[in-house]
Amino acid sequence: MHKRDSGVTPPSVIYRVEPEYSDEARQAGIEGTVVLSALIDEKGKATNLKVTQPLGHGLDQMAMEAVDRWVFRPGMKDSKPAAVQTSIEVGFHLRSSLSWHLSDISYKPLEDASDPVLTSEKYPPNAAPGSTASITLSFDVDEHGVPVRLQVEKSSDRKWEADVLAAVGEWRFAPGMRNFEAVVVPCTVSLTLGESRSALGGPLRIGNGVLPPQVISKVAPKYTKEASKAKLEGTVIVLVVVDEQGHPRDVRVIRPLGLGLEEMAIEAVRQWLFRPGTKDGKPVAVQATIQVNFLLR
């Protein structure tokens, strides 16, 4: 065992689970930090967890349960993984149940063009209890999947308009496609300040407190005879829902490559395994985009 000194590189977190709140602490409005001591072993596992700075109200146990699931890059000494004694801070912060979420989205693509697909999104900060609002924006999704020419169509509270415009300006899409080429597509979205989106059901999207799923194992896609003969290389982008168990479902292509490689991409991704996405430390179904590369060898 080593301490964080004398030429020892400290461990670092590569995967973390957010701690849950105890009912007692939530009702009491307790916020703060629990400090733990831990031995991070050569495999990146936290062992010998002890509370050195408690917070009480059941949060100390919640902190230990969360860190027990964390994965670390182990410390190093003389270029070899080493067990290192360290301290870990686990923060607890209450969040408002009122947040912005997408309540409606519609597109007006050209004839024979596909709709864009929302791949990442950002929202204004959560609001204090009692706040409500709704704002409708219009914009174009350009050939790169970026919202441009944003403007407010309807607003119930002008004080939120700048925040909503700034947040939606950072959204990204897989652009609409026509004859295998990206095209500009007009879009209208409505955002509502109210109950969190998780209350609406269905898969969540990455961001706004939702952590992405991570690939545990993957299967390389096969080539079709036509694509191999044509020496076609490139990337197929698929939209997939990774469920709470880390299994992919509802796989569909949002950017094709042609010559049958879309079907090969879907077949491969259906065999992948994931560490599921999480929200508030709990596994949730998450919608994500995946790039499937085709390279001839």
Image: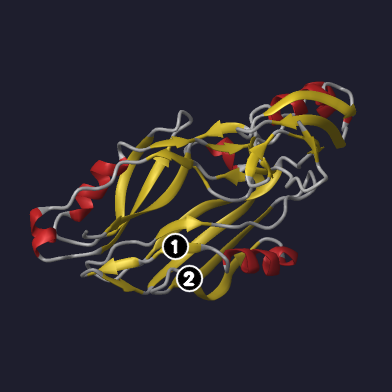
**Identity of the residue drawn at 43% across and 68% down:** 145
Residue that sits furthest to the front in the current view: 78
Tell me if 236 is positioned left or right of 57 in this view. left
Q: Secondary structure at mark 2?
A: loop
Contact? badges 1 and 2 (CB < 8 Å): yes
Q: Position of residue 289 (x, y in %)?
A: 41, 52
**Identity of the residue drawn at 70% across and 42% down:** 11
Q: Amino acid at mark 1?
A: Phe
Q: CA distance from mark 1 to mark 2?
A: 7 Å
**Identity of the residue drawn at 49% across and 35% down:** 275
Q: Amino acid at mark 2?
A: Val
Tell me if 212 is positioned left or right of 50 in this view. left
The residue that mark 2 highlights is 146
Q: Say whether disc 1 or disc 2 marks the residue closer to the N-terminus.
A: 2
Q: Residues within 10 Å of mark 1 (few under 14, many from 20)?
A: many
Residue 203 or 11: which is nearer the viewer?
11
The residue that mark 1 highlights is 173
Q: Position of residue 191 (x, y in %)?
A: 58, 56
